[in-house]
Amino acid sequence: MGLGQEPVRIINSVAPIRINDFGGWTDTWFARFGKVLNIAVCPMAEVQMRVFERNASRPAITIYAENYGERYTLDGVGGTYDRHPLLEAALQFMGVPEDLALEIDIFCEAPAGASTGTSAAVSVALTGALDLLTPGRLTPHEVARAAHRIETELLHQQCGVQDQLASAYGGINYIEILEYPHAIVSPLLLSHSTLWELEARLSLIFLGQSHSSSKVHERVIAELEDAGPDAEKLHPLRRTPIRARDALYAGDFPALGRAMIDNTDAQAALHPELVSATHQAVIDVARRHGAIGWKVNGAGGDGGSVTLLGGAEAAKNRQMLRAIAEAVPGTQNIPVYLNATGLRVWEFPR
C-alpha cells in the first residue's frame, strides 16, 4: 500500500461458515466412513486480493488479517508458517506466480473458535481467490479438497471433510463419506417456505470464548481409533443426518429438533465434557423458553457455540434470546442467514 502503483487486478472471494453439523465426528480419518448434514450460513469469510506486477520495491506478499489487526509481509511462499499458518500454508499449496506481488485482506464477522468452520471458510475463500491467478478453474469440490489438504497435509491438523465442503458448495448438504476423505455431496432442494421458516427459527449462540480442542478431544479420538470405524458410539451419529434430511424434506420442524437433540446427546456419549456446563446452561434456558431443538456445533468441548431451533412464534424466540443473554453472561447471539451460493469469486473492475 502507498507505493504508488495501481493493482493490475482486484480479486474478491467470499465463503460461508456452517452450523448444525449433524453426524460430525463421522467425517474423519478414524471413522473412515459416515454421513453428515450441515447448513451453510452467513456471515462469510471475505478475501480481497490486490495483484501487482512484481518489482524490487514491493514485498512479494502482504497479508492483512483484519480481525487480529495484523499486517505483515512475506518474501515468498514456502518454509515455515510463523504468523498465521493457515494463510501461509494456503499460499504455499496454491503457489503464487513469480512475476506477481499480492496484497491480501482477510476478514470474517464470525468469531474465531466458534466451532462453525470459520477456518475452513477462510481457507476456501483464499484458495478460491488464488485459483484465479493461474489458468484453469477448480470446481467447488476441488477447492474443498485443496483446503482440506492444506489443514491435514501441510499443517498436520485433525480435520474432517465436512467444513470445507459446506463452504465451497453452500446450501444445505447431505454428505456421504464413502472412504475418508472421499465424499459425495447431495444438496437438499427445499421449498422457499421451508427455507424461510428454517432461517427464521435458527439462532447461533456463541459462548464468548474460543473453542478448544483440548485433551478431551485427544482422549475421544484415541478411544474411537482403538474401537475402529464400527465403534458403537458412532452409530447414532451416522443416523441423525438421515433423520435431519428427511425432516427437512417433510418440513417437519419438531422432527428436525429431535434429531438435533439426539445428535447432541450422542456427542455427550463420546465424552461428557464435549457438552460443557456453559453449553448446557444455554440449552436449559432455551428449553424453558420454547426451543424445540439444540445442537452443540462442531466437536464440542470448552467454548464454541450452540445452534438453537425455535418454535413457530417469532416473539417468543426473541424473548428466548434475551433470556439467554441475561442468564448466561458472556454469550452472544450471532445473526445467521442461509447461504445458497457457497464460494463466490469475482474480479471488479475487469
Image (cartoon, helix red, strand yellow):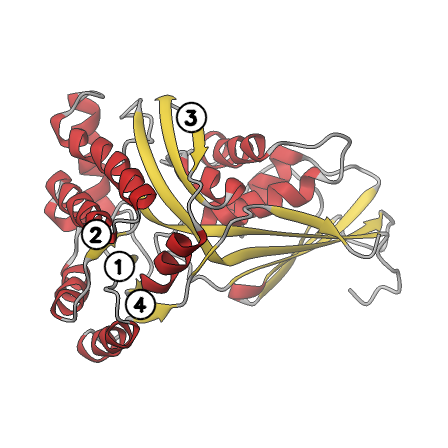
Residue at the image position 18 percent from the left and 30 percent from the top: 234
Q: Is residue 203 visible?
A: no
Q: Position of residue 287 (x, y in %)?
A: 14, 65
Q: Amino acid at mark 3?
A: Ala
| Closer to us: 286 or 24 | 286
Q: Secondary structure at mark 2?
A: helix
Snapshot quadrant of residue 217: top left
76 horizontally vs 245: left or right: right
Residue under circle 1?
Answer: 309
Disc 2 residue type (three-letter)? Gly
Q: Which mark lies nearer to you, 2 or 3? A: 2
Q: Earlier in the sequence, mark 1 or mark 4?
A: 4
Numbered mark located on residue 257 in the image: 2
Identify which amino acid the numbered label 4 is placed on.
Gly
Alpha-carbon span between mark 3 and mark 4: 33 Å
Q: Earlier in the sequence, mark 1 or mark 2?
A: 2
Q: Nearer the viewer, residue 14 or 98?
A: 14
Using a 10 Å C-alpha cutoff, classify the residue at mark 3 as few (fewer than 14 neighbours), some (14 to 19) or many (20 or more).
many
Q: Mark 1 or mark 3: which comes first in sequence? A: 3
Residue that label 4 marks? 208
Q: CA distance from mark 1 to mark 2?
A: 6 Å
Q: How far across and down, in percent of the image, does residue 128 sit?
A: 63, 42
316 in relation to 124, above or below: below
C-alpha separation, residue under disc 1 versus residue under disc 3? 28 Å
